[in-house]
Amino acid sequence: MRTPRPLALEATIGSLAPGGDGVAHADVHGERRAIFVARTAPGDRARLEADLSTRPARGRLLQLLASGNDRVAPACAWADRCGGCDWMHLSLTAQARIHAEHVRAALPLEFRDIPIAWTPAVQGLRYRSRARIHVRCPRGGRVIVGIHEAGTRDPVEVEDCAILEPVLELTRRSLCGLFEGSVGQGAVQLARGDNGRPVLHIRWTGELAANVFGRLERDVAAGRLAGALIAIDGATRPARIGDPTPWTTAADGLPLRLAPGGFAQAHAMANAALVRHIADHVAACRVDRAVELYAGSGNLSVLLADQVGILECVEANGAACQASRANLAARGLRASVIEADAAHHTWNSATKFVVLDPPRTGAHDVARRLLTSRVKHVVYVSCDAPTLGRDLAVLESAYAVRSATTFEMFPQTSHVEAVVALDRRKP
C-alpha cells in the first residue's frame, strides 16, 4: 500500500494538546481530521504540510500567516529545534492558563468543575538550577554538546541556554573543552553544589580521555566546580573528584542537601511557593500524625515536620534518605525517615493525613489503598496531569476536592506541577 503524500493546507490552531502541540482541524476528503502541529499557538493561522497516515495527523509548520494573541517572540534563537522548551513561543500568562486547562481536562468528571488556582511564573528565564546535557564524541570528530532535538535523540548545539542559571550556563559552555579527546557518548547532570558552585554527575559510554580527570581536578582546585562524580560503563564504582553533593535552597530559606544524581525541583521560587502551600494546608487541618510518601531528600519534610507531632517520611532511595535525615537534623526537627517502597508502605491506622509526591508514573497502588483507609486528608503533588487524573478517579467516590492549584515549575515548557488537596467525604 502506497504511503499518501503530505497534504499542503491552511488551518487555524484551535487549542494546545497536553503534549504541547497545537491542534488544528480540517476537512480532508469529506472527513474532519485533527492535525497536531508543534511550536504553534492558539489562534495561529498557518500553512501546514500534513501527514494523514497517522491518527491524529501530524503537521509541519510551513508558514505562519497570522499570529494568535498568545504568541510571543521566543527568547532563544534555537527554540524551534531544541527539545528543551516547547512553549517558548507562548506568553507566560498563556502558559499558566493552558496548564490549568490541561489539568482540569485530566480530572475525573465529578471534579471537572472545581476552581483551579493558577498564576504565571515570576521568573521565566535563567531559572533552572538543574539540567541534563548530552555529549557525543565521535572518533576523529569534534565534541558535540547539547539538549536533545525535538522528536529525536540528537543533541542540538546552542550558543546560549536561556533558562539555565548563569553559573550553570558558564559550566555548560565549558563541556566541549572538558571532553576533548574522548570517544563515546554520555549525559552530564548539572546542579548547584557547595557554596553555589556547580557539580557534575557524568555517565559515560565509551572512553574518557585521561585529561578529563585532570581538567576536573584543576577546576575544583580553582573553585570553578565544587566536585564531579564520573560513572563509566563497565567500571565497578564511580570516580569522585572534590565534593559532588548537590545542594539547593529549601522553602525555609536554608540549604537543602540532595542525593547525588537524585531528583530535585529545578525552579527554586516556584518550589518554595509549592512547599509553603502544602505546609499551610497541613497546618490548617491540625493533625497529630502524617505520612509523606515519595519523600525524596526532604524538600517537603523540612516544613511538614514542624506542623505535625509525628511525621513518617517514606523514600526508596537510600542516598535520598541519608540526605533527608541530615536536612532534618540541621534544623533540629524530628521525623522518622523510612527507606522503603512508598507504593507498598503500610502506614499506622491512626494516620489521618497523607502527602504524596510520586514520579511521573503516578501512585495508582497508593490511591487504591487510600480508598479503603481511614485517612481523612490527602495532598497529591503531580507533574503529570494524565496520571493525576487516573489516580483521582480511584479516590473520587471517597474524597472531595478541597483545593487544586497549579505551579509554574517548568516555564517555557508544556509541563506543570499540580497540587490537589482532598478531604474524605462524610458517610
Image: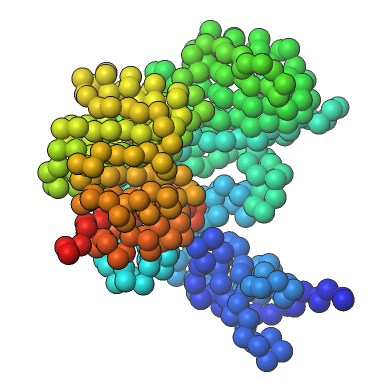
Does any portion of residue 81 appear in the rendered image? no
From the viewer's perspective, tell me whether residue 3 is left or right of residue 126: right
Image coordinates of residue 188 in percent, x first then y, are 60, 29
Vertical arrangement, residue 46 with respect to residue 96, above or below: below
Q: Quadrant of residue 70?
A: bottom left
- Residue 129, horizontal then vertical, whole percent: 45, 34
Residue 340 in view, yes or no: yes
Quarter of the image with the C terminus is: bottom left
In this rendered view, identify the residue nearer to me: 52 or 402: 402
Q: Quadrant of residue 194?
A: top left
Q: Is residue 326 above or below residue 155?
A: above
Judge from the rendering whether residue 279 lies leftward or rightward of residue 189; answer left or right: left
Residue 401 percent coordinates (x, y): 25, 61
Q: Nearer the viewer, residue 74 or 274?
A: 274
Q: Quadrant of the N terminus?
A: bottom right
Q: How is the image coloured?
A: rainbow
Q: How many marks?
A: 0
The percent coordinates of residue 212 (x first, y second) are 68, 16
Q: Residue 240 vs residue 426: left or right?
A: right
Q: Residue at x 37, y 38 (%)?
A: 345
Q: Residue at x 77, y 21 (%)?
A: 207
Which residue in the rendered view is the most extreme toward the bottom?
30
Identified at 74% across, 73% down, the residue is 53
In front here: 180 or 264?
264
Q: Which residue is at 49% across, 72% downward?
A: 15
Q: Is residue 103 left or right of residue 224?
A: left
**In-front residue for pair 107/96:** 107
**Vertical placement of residue 338 versus 113, above or below:** above
